[in-house]
Image (cartoon, rainbow, N blue to C red):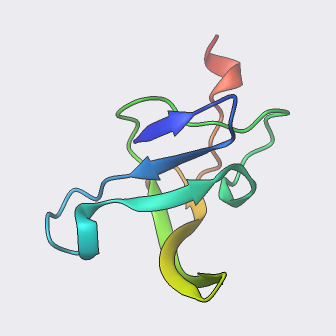
Amino acid sequence: VTFYKFQGYGFITPDEAGAIPGDKVFVFWKNIQTQDRYPFLNKDQKVQFTLTLAEKQGVKTLQAENVCQPGGAPIAVQDEA
C-alpha cells in the first residue's frame, strides 16, 4: 500500500503479481471501511478489497472499494497511535 494521507488517495499492490493490469489499483479515502475521522492507510499495510470499474472523462480504470483489514474488519489506523 502506498497512500498519500493529505491528498486522500493511494495505490494498493496485490500480493499476486499479474492479477490486475499494472499491478496496482487506485484507492480513494471514501472507499476505506473505517470509523476513523480521517481515513488513511499505512505503507505496506495488508488489506482486503473488491474491485470496481470506474469511468472518469471517458477513461475506464479499476478502483479498490470496500477496503478493510484481511478478514473483513474495519481499518483502525488512528487507534494505533
Residue at image position (75%, 56%) is 30
The one nearer the camera, 67 or 18, is 18
Residue 47 visible, this angle:
yes
Q: Quadrant of the C terminus?
A: top right
Residue at image position (60%, 82%) is 54
The one nearer the camera, 79 or 43, is 43
Q: Is residue 56 above or below residue 34?
A: below
Residue 71 x %, y %:
47, 58
Residue at image position (25%, 67%) is 22
Side of 17 where 57 appears, left or right? right
Residue 72 visible, this angle:
no
Residue 53 x %, y %:
54, 85
Q: Is residue 37 above or below residue 34?
A: above
Residue at image position (62%, 42%) is 75
Q: In this view, does 14 lie above or below 43?
A: below
Q: Is residue 80 above or below residue 57?
A: above
